[in-house]
């Protein structure tokens, strides 16, 4: 499906750029693309894809946090942040 959309987009762009009809054909293509994008089936597919992406992101984030690697990264971030804050508080105001 993605390949077809890329092909049609390239075809439309080539037609617009190579066309002598110019603006009229461009407006016609633009209106048809807008109608296609706003169609309920395309919007539904976009919604499903967005929901799947959000689900995969959340699952991956949860797995990383629960894994040992995630714990080590979290500890490293926490200790690095704590050290830098402690170090900045111990310096006198005039010292760089």
Image (spheres, rainbow, N blue to C red):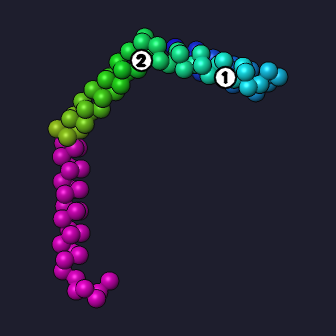
The percent coordinates of residue 95 (x first, y second) are 29, 87
Residue drawn where x is 18% and y is 72% of the image: 86
Report which residue position mark 2 lands on: 43
Residue 12 horizontal side relative to residue 41, left or right: right
Q: Picture coordinates of residue 9 (x, y %)?
A: 63, 21
What residue range appears in magenta? 67-96
Magenta stretch encompasses residue 75:
yes
Label 2 neighbour load within 10 Å: few <14, some 14-19, many 20+: few
The residue beneath circle 1 is 27
Q: Secondary structure at mark 1?
A: helix
Against 84, residue 18 (above or below) is above
82, 44: nearer the viewer: 44
Indicate which label's residue lies in the foreground, 1 or 2.
1
Identify whether 69 is placed above or below 56.
Answer: below
Which one is earlier in the sequence, the residue at label 1 or at label 2? 1
Q: Position of residue 89 (x, y in %)?
A: 19, 77
Q: Secondary structure at mark 2?
A: helix
Residue in the picture at 60% in, 19% down? 31
> Is residue 59 covered in magenta?
no
């Amino acid at each position: 499906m993605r390949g077809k959309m890329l092909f049609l987009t390239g075809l439309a762009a080539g037609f617009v750029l190579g066309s002598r009809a110019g603006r009229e054909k461009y407006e016609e293509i633009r209106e048809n693309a807008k109608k296609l994008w706003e169609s309920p089936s395309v919007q539904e597919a976009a919604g499903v894809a967005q929901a799947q992406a959000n689900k995969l992101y959340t699952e991956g984030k949860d797995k990383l946090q629960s894994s040992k690697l995630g714990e080590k990264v979290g500890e490293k971030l926490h200790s690095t942040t704590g050290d830098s804050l402690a170090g900045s508080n111990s310096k006198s105001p005039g010292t760089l």
